Image (cartoon, grey):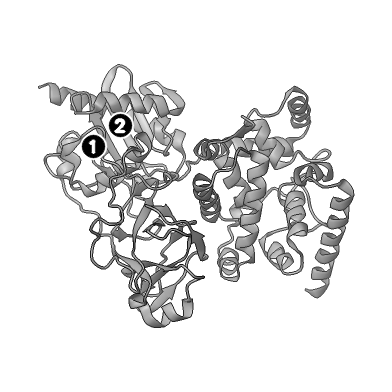
Amino acid sequence: MTACVSEPVSWLRLERYALGELDGAAAGAIRDHLAACPVCHACLARIEADDRALPPLPVSRAKPTRAFWSWPRLAWAGGLLAAAAALLLVLRPGRDARPVLGQSTPPGDRIKGGTDATIAIVRERAGAVTAEAATFEDGDRFEVRVTCAQLAPVWADVVVFQRAEVSFPLAPSRIPCGNDVTFPGAFRITPGPGGLEPATVCVAIDPAGTPDRVAIQAAGPGAPGLACRPLALAPPPLRAGLCDQLLPAKLRDRHFPSMTMLDEELPPQVAAAGCLLSDAKRPAHVHVLCQDEPGFAGLMDAVRASATKVTELSVGRAAFTADATLQLWDDDAPCLATLNGYTGDATALARALAASLTPAIGARIHALAQ
Amino acid sequence: MAAVSDPTIAYRTFGPALIRKAERLLRSREDAVDVVHALFVELVQHPPDTMDLPYLYRAVTNRCLNAVRDRATRARLLAREEASVAPVARVRCDDEVIGLELLAKLTDRLDERHLEVLVCRYVDEMTQDEIADHLGTSRKTIGKRLAKIRDEVIALRGDA
């Protein structure tokens, strides 16, 4: 059924109505129409049911930071670190920890042809942002940040080399020079006929005009004026039995909406972290941080401050923070579960996870108290 | 919240609505997310004084049309068009639903001003008065542009 009873309410007006932006008369007119028109009412229902998460927005002029709360036992747990980065970027977009021009830059980063510039590749994987990505897998989104020294804006173009293939995923753009200037747009690296292959991501910079794509294609990654970073393929997720010791059996290999939880290998030092990993395509990580962990109070305050749409559950509370990280906590229980990278039906998952994780949190608290 | 000046707040507030709009046009959630995300990456770098949903709707329209105009992107979008996200299409042009394929053909025949009216009318499903208000032009002009759009749709049907 697509016929409206009269003139349909436009999607823009429906969206503004759903946001509560319209004044009394305009809202009243829409309300009256919706009461009489099942088609437009269905459109509004569609808006209200669409509760999927937004990918995190990078902070301007990149500020990958050091944690204001320390979780040293996680420092080398690669998968968890990537997930934690997304949270930290939003909670504390603070000091610029990256090298600036004039400081030493890694070899291979310099622009050949006299232009001094470096690049950083920012990866977003299912909601988790990694500021200086070195690996990738199918489905990752990338942005490039350029640090260059010219006084005037320069022309820049992103180039991706994979074996013999050269692609230019974004339109050339004139960007101002500075530290960590985000190149406009995001891109993905898609598998070729032979599957995914390691890539080299470069930015061609030319102060005079748009970089010559034909020349770059002909010369390859060695072309003058390129700043490059290699991207290796992400290793397959590790499987081990450590989660057996950390989590109750009912949490392992459990199917949630759009997500299957699997074991993830973690070092023994990461004793207080839950270790659940979604299927390989859309990894999502669950962390459990408890009261006796360093930084717990600060993190909990930050989560409470930035949580949106807090859902009351019989077993606690669930909410998304600004970076689309799902948080689960119980005001009476001194633990917080953090889920990065989930993009499916948040409410259903929140309920399912909260119901399952709370006993796990309880078990963990009990174990820590021993 | 009518207008905001902080792009991150605007993203959080209006982002979902803009993604839905882009998805109706591009028929791909993934591409819709990319379009809206790229828009806000730019807004974070060069924030306007204020932005509200109508302003951002226009920005998303233009970016989606650029994506459809780009031959490589168009081919990819058409190849993976997801039927499941087809719009309800309460408003049709001469009994035609303006789908991605028809829109792609029309981008070759119409200029930007006409395409923006086309999106307002047949994708965003605005009334002529609303379009005139949204684009800051007269209803008469909108009527003329819609007439030309109808002519082109009929011509395309004849070509087919």
Q: Judging from the image, what secondary structure is the residue with disc 2 in? A: strand
Q: Which mark is residue A337?
A: 2
Name the side, left or right, on which B50 lies relative to B128.
left
Residue that mark 1 sits on: A274
Q: Could you tell me which chain the residue with mark 2 belongs to?
A: A
Q: Is residue B115 visible?
A: yes
| Residue A91, above or below A97 | above
Three-letter residue code for mark 2: Ala
Q: Residue at x 43, y 45 (%)?
A: A60
What is the CA distance from the residue labelled 2 to the residue labelled 1? 8 Å
Local packing at callout 1 (Cα closer than 10 Å; few below 14, some 14-19, many 20+) is many
Name the side, left or right, on which A292 lies relative to A137.
left
Q: Is residue A358 visible?
A: no
Q: Are tags 2 and 1 found on a single chain? A: yes
In the displayed orientation, state which residue is furthest to the top.
A332
Where residue A197 appears, as percent x and y from the top left, is 33, 70
* Quadrant location of the N terminus of chain A in the rendered image: top right
Where residue A120 appears, as percent x and y from the top left, is 34, 57
- Nearer to us in this view, B54 or A212: A212
In the displayed orientation, state which residue is furthest to the bottom.
A218
Q: Could you tell me which chain the residue with mark 1 belongs to?
A: A
